Amino acid sequence: MVYLMALALPFTREAFQDERAAGLPPGELVYRVLVRVPLGTVLLEEVAFRGVLWAMVRRRWGHVWATVSSSVLFGLWHVQPSRGLTRANAAAQAVFGAGQVGVALSVAAAVVGTALAGAVFCELRRRSGSLIPPVALHCALNSLGYALAWAASRRWA
């Protein structure tokens, strides 16, 4: 619902217009949304950060430290993929600026945002005792975000 509301509002719609998704042919979009994101991104990250790391730290220091360490590392894991954000997304560039300062600010925001998302995923993991809920939410967020960015590039370009 949040994605759809943001896409419907003109002042937040621009955030979905990302050239990394815009140029994809439909077949490549389907592959990324249904295969690459779920298996190559989400499953890998959830097993590593909420499965192995979270369980190892929880066993030794408890769930609070497990959540903090897993979430911080999950945020840092996203430094490299967020480095091109201001170049590929006009809305990000408008918010953070261009050049090295804009890149640094957008990377910092991405790290904080993904660390907070990681904390939510950890809490789902803790409350459910399973990786299935965080995997499902993570997959839904990433895949739907990709699909909506692609659709927005075609509808409002």
Image (spheres, rainbow, N blue to C red):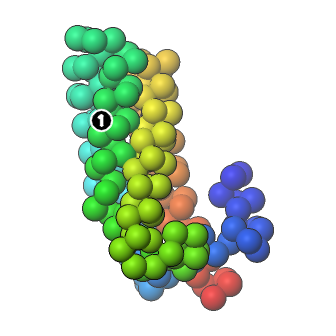
Q: Position of residue 82 (x, y in %)?
A: 37, 63
Q: Position of residue 80 (x, y in %)?
A: 28, 62
Residue drawn at x 33%, y 22% as measured from the top left = 66
Is residue 47 rendered to the left or right of residue 63? left
Q: Quadrant of residue 7?
A: bottom right
Q: Position of residue 47 (x, y in %)?
A: 28, 36
Check the image and report above or below for 32 versus 86. above
Q: Taking the image as drawn, is residue 155 in sight? A: yes
The number of numbered discs placed on residues in the rendered structure image is 1
Q: Position of residue 137 (x, y in %)?
A: 51, 42
Q: Residues within 10 Å of mark 1 (few under 14, many from 20)?
A: many
Residue drawn at x 68%, y 72% as measured from the top left = 13
Is residue 149 rendered to the left or right of residue 3? left
Residue drawn at x 37%, y 28% as measured from the top left = 68
Element under disc 1: helix
Quick one: 72 or 6, which is closer to the camera? 72
Quick one: 33 or 76, which is closer to the camera? 76
Q: Quadrant of residue 8?
A: bottom right
Q: Quadrant of residue 59?
A: top left
Q: Taking the image as drawn, is residue 38 in sight? A: no
Residue extending furthest front?
Answer: 101
The kind of residue on which mark 1 rests is: Phe
Query: Mark 1 — residue?
Result: 49
Check the image and report above or below for 61 versus 122. above
